Image (cartoon, rainbow, N blue to C red):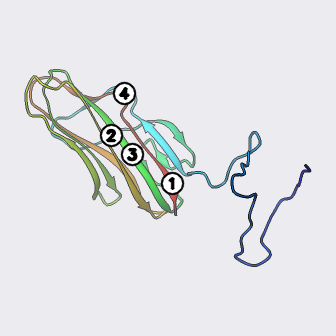
Amino acid sequence: MGTIKTTNIEPIADNGTVTLGSSGDTFTLGSGVVQSNLNYPAFEAEISGTITLTASTTETIPFSVENLDTNSAFDTGTYTFQPTVAGKYFVYAQARFSHGGDDLGYIQISLINESDSNIVTAIQEDRDQNNAESRMLNFSKIVDMNGSTNTLRVTSFAEQLGAGSITLRSNTLFGAYRIGS
């Protein structure tokens, strides 16, 4: 087999189709080659250490550690995601709540858009004292983003039933990636 080197391949007709290979063929990218149609932009961020919450107060979760941010679309100062590419995004978040006194009641995490309207909320409620010390909430949602003004952030709310502090702990994270236009 030979090697073809070129900088551009186009169909003969405008808006035509170029077919590479046939059914069952596999194309392998060389080392260091970046595929242009991957699910970008993409990010994932998590909290740093343990975050103490104010009981019965809605708070933006401070995701200050980026695990991944392909297009610098996540702001660790405002804890918001604002992609510059329009499209549909798979968005997910999870939060691990703990209570020092085993008295963790109603908890929720919410995905909020730029106008503070709620897109999706995960809620768990357990009002029995001495019952729950640590619980995990999570959600996922496909969200349409316009690529210019849409921003997303995640908030938390936790009810305290007894003495002790409410915290967010490790494995609290927020992420998204583009899945299409």
Point out which mark residue 170 bears.
4
Query: Which callout, 4 or 3, points at the residue further toward the start of the chain?
Result: 3
Query: Which callout, 3 or 2, points at the residue further toward the start of the chain?
Result: 2
Check if mark 4's residue and mark 3's residue have beta carbons within 8 Å: no
The answer to whether residue 150 of the structure is visible from this angle is: no
Q: From the viewer's perspective, is residue 19 above or below residue 168?
A: below
Point out which mark residue 105 bears.
none
Query: Which callout, 1 or 3, points at the residue further toward the start of the chain?
Result: 3
| Cα distance between the residues tagged 4 and 2 | 13 Å
Q: Which residue is mark 1?
A: 178
Q: Which residue is mark 2?
A: 61
| Cα distance between the residues tagged 4 and 1 | 25 Å
> Mark 3: which amino acid?
Tyr
> Mark 1: which amino acid?
Arg
Q: Which residue is mark 3?
A: 92
| Cα distance between the residues tagged 4 and 3 | 16 Å
